[in-house]
Amino acid sequence: MNRPDDEGSAAVEFLMLTLLLLIPIVYLVLAVFTIQGASFAAAGAARDAARVLATTTDPAGATRSVESGVALAFEDFSIGVAPLVTVTCEAAGCDEPGSLVHVTVSARVPLPLLPSFLVERATVPISASSTGVVDRFRER
């Protein structure tokens, strides 16, 4: 009875399965962590921007602070995108005591490790919102 020589085939099968399964799983984990980091950055930036706008007495300075704070939040998570910040206020205005300031931070986060020609197509939209109440007893 002649049996074919199977010596060493288990190592080759293990190597092939490792490459076929491990690399996509590692990429999936990396992509999920990137998107989650961008979500955390957007949520923190929206919350802080709403607080700044609700407590400020200088609207021009607050706008600069919000823009730099949002950019810093995304830099902290190593997200290389320019987020879009949208601020809306109630009909009374952003500086009326007791009014609500709504801030939305949104961005399109590219998936990691993709060639440059695919980055435009392979993005994940993220968005976070926060609402701040303008202090009723603040000075103008």
Image (cartoon, helix red, strand yellow):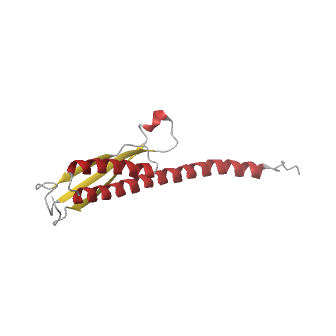
Q: Is 61 placed left or right of 18 in the picture?
A: left
Residue at 31% over, 55% down: 46
Q: How many marks?
A: 0
Residue 67: x, y in percent? 31, 47
Residue 66: x, y in percent? 30, 51
81, 73: nearer the viewer: 73
Residue at 66% over, 51% down: 18
Q: Is 56 placed left or right of 5 in the picture?
A: left
Q: Is 27 placed left or right of 36 in the picture?
A: right
33, 93: nearer the viewer: 93
Q: Tell me which corner region of the image, top left, top right, bottom left or bottom right, holds residue 47.
A: bottom left
91, 94: nearer the viewer: 94
Quadrant, the C terminus? bottom left
Outermost residue toward the right in this view: 1
79, 51: nearer the viewer: 51
Residue 89: x, y in percent? 17, 54
Q: Tell me which corner region of the image, top left, top right, bottom left or bottom right, holds residue 56.
A: bottom left
Residue at 40% over, 43% down: 81
Residue 11: x, y in percent? 76, 51
Residue 118's place in the image compared with 44, above or below, is above
Residue at 19% over, 64% down: 135
